[in-house]
Amino acid sequence: MESRSRNMAIAYQSLIPLLLLSAAVSAVEVQRPRGVSLSKKHFYVEGKPFTCLDGSRTISFDRINDDYCDCQDGSDEPGTPACPNGSFHCTNAGHRPVFIPSSRINDGVCDCCDGTDEFNSGASCPNTCRELGRKEKEVLQKLAEIAKEGFILKQQLIQEAKRGLEEKKAKAIDLEASKKQLEEKVEALRTVKEAAEEPEKEAKERHLKAWENEKAAIRAEKDNARMAEVFLELDDDGDGFVSLTELQSHSELDTDSDGSFTEMEAQGLLGGVDKVDTVAFEAVWKEIKDKYISESQVETRHEETREPLPDNDSEHYSEGEIPEEDDDNDDDQEEVDDEEEEEEDDDDPDDADYNRPPVVKAKKDDEDEGVMPPYDEETQNLIDAAQKAREQFDETERALRELDDQLKSLEKETSSDFGPSAEFAYLYNQCYDLPTSEYIYRLCPFKQVTQKPKMGGSETSLGTWGHWDGPEGNVYTVMKYENGLGCWQGPNRATTVKLKCGKETVVTSTTEPSRCEYLMEFTTPALCQDPKTLDPMLHTEL
């Protein structure tokens, strides 16, 4: 199919004069040696010496077609198979004249449609040139009709592209003006936001500091109560003093942790005296409170160090009396996990709870401190004002980013190479599918080519837009898509898209000629040329 299309394209240029020439030859046969084309007839003048076409030597005319190769280029034997590099011209009146290797002369196979290559082989070669010419003319007439309609569509596409380009350029100018205004607005709102956040920050810090002071007062009050409780606990004789002996009863206060709480160590804790009253005990308390263990704590520790029950607890119960396991531990762990998740979310400035007083979790020893109280009205008003300023700034900055993205997209589109007259511009932002038995192939011109299984699955990139890759002088006939998904232990996938003239814009075929290299054929009116060059041939009598 590709070869046939290529032949049709060649016909647009070369077939016209050749068919006209063939028609003329059929009317008046020009005498010349067998196998010589009309264009080379003047080199072969009967009765005059012949010079080989490569200029290597000159021979007498009677040695032309004598079945002996005299010229190195084989030009002296155009009508015999004597020269291995010779060529025979098929006149093919009514169809296209062609050259064939002279080795095919009289080989029993009809190579020329007029049968002139088998003049002495005995092969029966009917002249089929007129029939072949008629069929080719029909094909060319259909191609001409397609080209004509496609060319009309192409002119429309060019006009639409021209209008579209002007509209996009005008839109880009408007967007640039809007962008400048938004940039100025963003900077103004940034100033407002920063001005609102400063007093908000100071008010929050004051509130937090007041709360920290309040907690410190609560802790001091609890510490004083604990100190008084410990003083009474140590004052075994109730005389209003804590003596060396009474202090030494708590061996956990051993200052050097050597296992022996001596009288000297106890006196050091009492400030060098033998006993202290409640006032002097304040200094002692600061030294011992981290180590001191009350009598209630000692009893708790004793409970914890009692001999544990055997692993098989059921041995201590009669049948039917085994208690159920307590799920409180699991519940407690869930509560801890929930608390940790809540604490992770507390630092998000975009959270609606960010402007509320943070819920400060009380430690086990500080459960009576409670949670931070709500902000006062003045602080909350400052927070609300700052939040409003932040929202206005964020909204405007987001609009600026979106506008900037539009501008970049416009600039990319208007600067892309859409052909000499932007005839391919209509393909931009469009996609065309070709379903096969297994896959759906999708071509998005100037963007990418993909492949997706019909029965479901992820999409595979067969390449992203690279460049026009047609031959010199006809570069807009081939698109190249590169750097697709890498094949397993192979190169990255790539796709070559060959464009052809057509009334419709459609992907006609997809193949994989070599591993990870795909070939896609695509018809578009944007490639159709002016069909007027085909008219003379269509009106030629074959």
Image: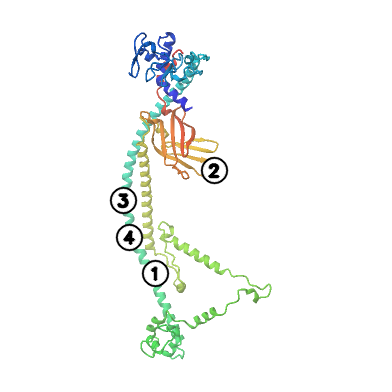
Which residue position is annotated with label 4? 198
Image disc number at residue 187: 3
Q: Name the element at disc 2.
A: loop
Q: For the residue marked with disc 3, what is the amino acid?
A: Glu
Q: Earlier in the sequence, mark 3 or mark 4?
A: 3
Of circles 4 and 2, the one toward us is 2
Q: Around disc 2, counting alpha carbons within 10 Å, would you say few (fewer than 14), some (14 to 19), or many (20 or more)?
A: few
Which residue position is annotated with label 2? 456
Q: Quadrant of residue 469?
A: top left
Q: For the residue marked with disc 4, what is the amino acid?
A: Glu
Q: Earlier in the sequence, mark 4 or mark 1?
A: 4
Image disc number at residue 211: 1
Q: For the residue marked with disc 2, what is the amino acid?
A: Gly
Image coords of residue 143 (percent x, y) = 46, 22
Viewer-nearest residue: 411 or 218: 411
How far separated are the C-alphas under marks 4 and 1?
20 Å
